[in-house]
């Protein structure tokens, strides 16, 4: 027996606080003693949750060890299912999730919501290319989260980080085509956004702080490391580090876009407030880009990006003999070591 869980056509949310109706695996006969087979109990709890349209929660008491055979949690379900590991109904901190496989989930795959302390390790998330809005892993309103050693190949963002997040480490993630998928490049990127849009949408306040993305690989993705915010809104995104990033034919490797807008551009008029982006550090970012624009920084006119550093950046064109360029608008950038292609930010 091994604890490998397959989710097929389903999506899962880890939440730190109970928000919905629950299906406790213990009520379905799980023992959690480390020796009994709890597979059936988990499946029954899942099926009950799956048939419920109120976004219910599958509750797994923490502090127990469940023996699970390979599980297929199959959808489609009537609503998104939350999945929580709690020591009591009000204390669901320190969630651990490891060695799970998610295949072809139609919508967002794993979300970590209102959680304090979570470690996510060894996930494999794949879905077909061109599946819109299929985020791999979304983190929001959560603190002290580690995401490690995972492979994510989905139709949309690999890892997305939304508002009210603090102390998030994203380490050794491969973002790009997963095995078993056609060898077409997938549209993927790392992005800071909340799940309804981006930071600052509808003039909301956004706070994102202490995010460390390191030793990650991007293969054939649309974006590499990207921060995007809407016009308007308030709050900040600060102390963000992207280091040891390897790029294989990524369209836009480094992006800050404070003019993010989808749909009707009348809804995206230039506003006098913006989410402040500051203390963003890029170091050891290397590889190839396919668009000709290796670095694009477009910061707000009223709240320019401050304290950006670039150290040892080398991005070459995928097309031999072509040069990569950079654009910079309203950003203050300090350079150390080498930065190729060179970037200059008129002030
Ligand atoms: C993230 O990494 C930093 C530096 O290595 C460490 O101090 C911090 O505790 C880590 N946070 C989590 C949630 O693992
Ligand atoms: C980010 O994480 C890496 C890997 O754990 C670590 O080496 C580095 O010091 C961290 N950086 C910051 C700013 O915490
Ligand atoms: C907002 O400002 C930017 C930068 O000056 C400009 O390129 C863009 O056209 C403006 N958009 C609108 C809707 O005025």
Image: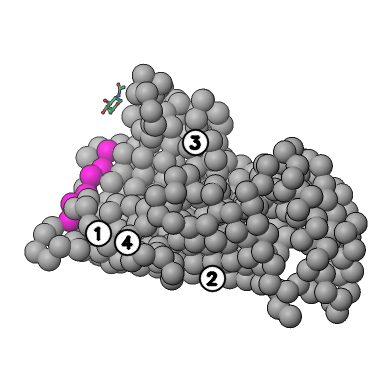
Place of residue 232 in the rendered image (x, y in percent of width and height, measured from the top left): 45, 26
Residue 75 circle label: none
User: Which stretch did the figure color magenta?
Assistant: 324-329
Residue 197 circle label: 3
Q: Residues within 10 Å of mark 2 (few under 14, many from 20)?
A: some
What scheme was used to colour the molecule? one colour
In this picture, residue 112 sits left or right of residue 257? right
- Residue 25 at least partly seen: yes
Q: SS at mark 2? A: strand
Front tag of 4 and 1: 4
Q: Quadrant of residue 341?
A: bottom left
First in sequence: mark 3 vs mark 1: 3
Q: Which residue is mark 4?
A: 184
Front tag of 3 and 4: 4
Place of residue 84 in the rendered image (x, y in percent of width and height, measured from the top left): 76, 54
Q: SS at mark 1? A: strand
First in sequence: mark 3 vs mark 2: 2
């Amino acid at each position: 027996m091994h604890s490998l869980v397959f989710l097929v056509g389903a999506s899962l949310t880890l939440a730190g606080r109970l928000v919905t109706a629950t299906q406790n695996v213990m009520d379905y006969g799980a023992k959690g003693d480390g020796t009994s087979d709890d597979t059936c109990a988990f499946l029954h709890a899942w099926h009950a949750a799956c048939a419920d349209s109120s976004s219910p929660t599958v509750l797994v008491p923490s502090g127990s060890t469940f023996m699970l055979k390979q599980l297929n949690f199959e959808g489609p379900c009537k609503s998104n299912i939350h999945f929580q590991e709690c020591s009591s109904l009000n204390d669901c901190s320190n969630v651990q999730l490891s060695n799970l496989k998610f295949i072809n989930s139609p919508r967002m795959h794993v979300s970590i919501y209102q959680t304090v302390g979570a470690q996510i390790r060894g996930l494999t998330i794949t879905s077909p290319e061109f599946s819109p809005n299929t985020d791999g892993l979304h983190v929001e309103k959560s603190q002290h989260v580690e995401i490690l050693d995972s492979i994510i190949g989905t139709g949309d963002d690999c890892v997305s980080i939304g508002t009210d997040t603090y102390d998030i480490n994203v380490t050794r993630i491969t973002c790009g085509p997963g095995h078993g998928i056609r060898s077409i490049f997938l549209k993927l990127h790392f992005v800071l956004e909340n799940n309804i849009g981006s930071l600052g949408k509808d003039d909301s306040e956004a706070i994102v702080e202490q995010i460390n993305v390191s030793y990650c690989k991007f293969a054939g993705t649309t974006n590499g490391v990207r921060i995007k915010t809407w016009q308007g809104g308030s709050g900040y995104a600060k102390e963000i580090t992207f280091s040891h990033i390897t790029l294989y034919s990524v369209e836009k490797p480094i992006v800050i876009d404070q003019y993010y807008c989808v749909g009707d551009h009348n809804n995206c008029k230039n506003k006098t407030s913006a989410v402040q982006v500051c203390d963003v550090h890029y170091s050891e970012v290397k590889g190839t880009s396919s668009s000709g624009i290796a670095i694009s920084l477009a910061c707000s006119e009223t709240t320019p990006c401050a304290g950006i550093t670039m150290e040892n950046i080398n991005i070459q064109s995928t097309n031999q003999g072509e040069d990569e360029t950079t654009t910079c608008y309203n950003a203050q950038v300090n350079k150390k070591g080498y930065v190729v292609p060179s970037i200059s930010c008129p002030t």
